[in-house]
Amino acid sequence: MAIVELVMPKMGESIMEATILRWHKKPGDAVKVDDTVLEIATDKVDSEVPSIAEGVITEILFNENDVVPVGTVIARVETAAGAQVAASPATASAPAEASRAAEPQYQTAPPRPQAAPAAVAPTGEARFYSPLVLTIAQQEGVSFAELEKIPGSGTEGRVTKRDILDYIANRGNQVQEPEVIREAPKAAPAASREITTVAATNSYGGNVEIIEMDRMRKLIADHMVRSKHTSPHVTSFAECDVTNMVRWRDAVKKDFEKREGEKITFMPLFVEAVVKCIKKFPLVNCSLDGDKIILKKDINIGMATALPSGNLIVPVIRNADNLNLVGLTKQVNLLANSARQNRLKPEHTQDGTFTITNVGTFGSLTGTPIINQPQVAILAVGAIKKRPVVVETEQGDSIAIRHMMYLSLSYDHRIVDGSLGSTFLSAVATELENFDPSRGF
């Protein structure tokens, strides 16, 4: 007999924990290799976790809705002698250094000391709160000011489910005075009391309907707020004439679909232009780690995709610089269709280095997108509209009807200054304007 441990897998470079949505197995259930054991969720994607061993589930260590750090043991499987166990980073034969560098998803249970995590006091920086902790706080009427004071015993001082439940259980024994009243100016105590009352009772005036956010919307909201707290956003705008590109697509789309079996949209053309410009300005394809600039050699383009629920997800075209237009088109269509059908895999949303969002799909002329952390820039492309514009020729200026489009680039001003951001954006606009209408595909 042997015990194989199932651990919470790492779902991406910026993902440190995941929420358990549903257990498909319970203690005593038999499992085979690749049988789904549970479903988990992060702020990027929902995913199924399979068993890597054939045997019997002997222990489940966490409940549904628990938020679990990556690498934590979540279940144990007892295998019979000679039972099949799939290869994993921890068991594959590799040099010792490579094994230590890999992040194993499963491993044979080694003896290890059991130690409770030490409580970590808040550092004064913006704290991350998991969706589960925020939900409990809302349900129990714990204000954000109170939440900030709760000592966290999780990774980097994060507040865990147990921390907030212990706080709620002992809150009745504490004498609390709303912080907003203590800090309010003496000249306006009445206004302060009024604000405190509204926050405490959650009263809403007028004819309203209260709609609870679904889980993904809560995760998106948290992701967006953290991005704004992390990066000082600056947005630059440009206008470009995409008449040649529009006419080319209209001319080739039937032949393209007949030959390749795929419909060609504008997104692969946008990706192609962005990739060319990233090669000229590689600093927009990086991330920050403290005061270190992590320059990404891979060009992995995320494309923001709307789901039928109205939520948003960002699948990633990996190594976009190695794909021609046909390859980009197939990847764009595959990822977009998989997102809409809820068939994305964890690897489809990982390791993005730059993001494009097409706000023109919904009729917007332009937008000011929020950076998709830990990236440092995101490009928004607006709706393509026919407009009369001045066209400069060797024979003189004239007014013509052209297909025009606005571009906007939001960037992290800690690393991308106005000069680089505006120059990169202008390069993308120029690339689109200089589209070769005689090219093939």
Image (spheres, rainbow, N blue to C red):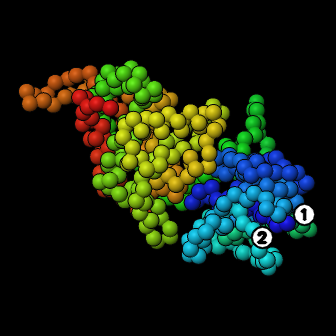
Amino acid type of disc 1? Answer: Ala
Left or right, 242 with reference to 229? left
Q: Residue at x 35, y 57 (%)?
A: 282
Q: Return the residue nearer the eye: 412 or 318.
A: 318
- The answer to whether marks 1 and 2 mark residues whose Cβ atoms lie closer than 8 Å is no
Q: Specify the quadrant of the image occupied by residue 238.
A: top left
Q: Residue at x 76, y 48 (%)?
A: 35
Circle 2 SS class: loop
| Residue 37 % position (x, y) | 78, 50
Judge from the rendering whether residue 413 lies leftward or rightward of residue 403; answer left or right. right
Residue depicted at x 28% and y 41%: 431
Where does label 2 land, which residue? 109
Q: Quadrant of residue 251?
A: top left
Q: Position of residue 138 (x, y in %)?
A: 78, 51
Q: Residue 276, percent across and down?
A: 32, 47
| Label number found at residue 169 | 1
The label shown at residue 9 is: none
Seen in the picture, residue 381 relative to 29 is either above or below; the reply is above
Q: Quadrant of residue 132?
A: bottom right
Label 1 Cα neighbours within 10 Å, binned few <14 / some 14-19 / many ≥20: few
Asked if residue 106 lies left or right of residue 389, the reply is right
State which quarter of the image contains the C terminus.
Answer: top left
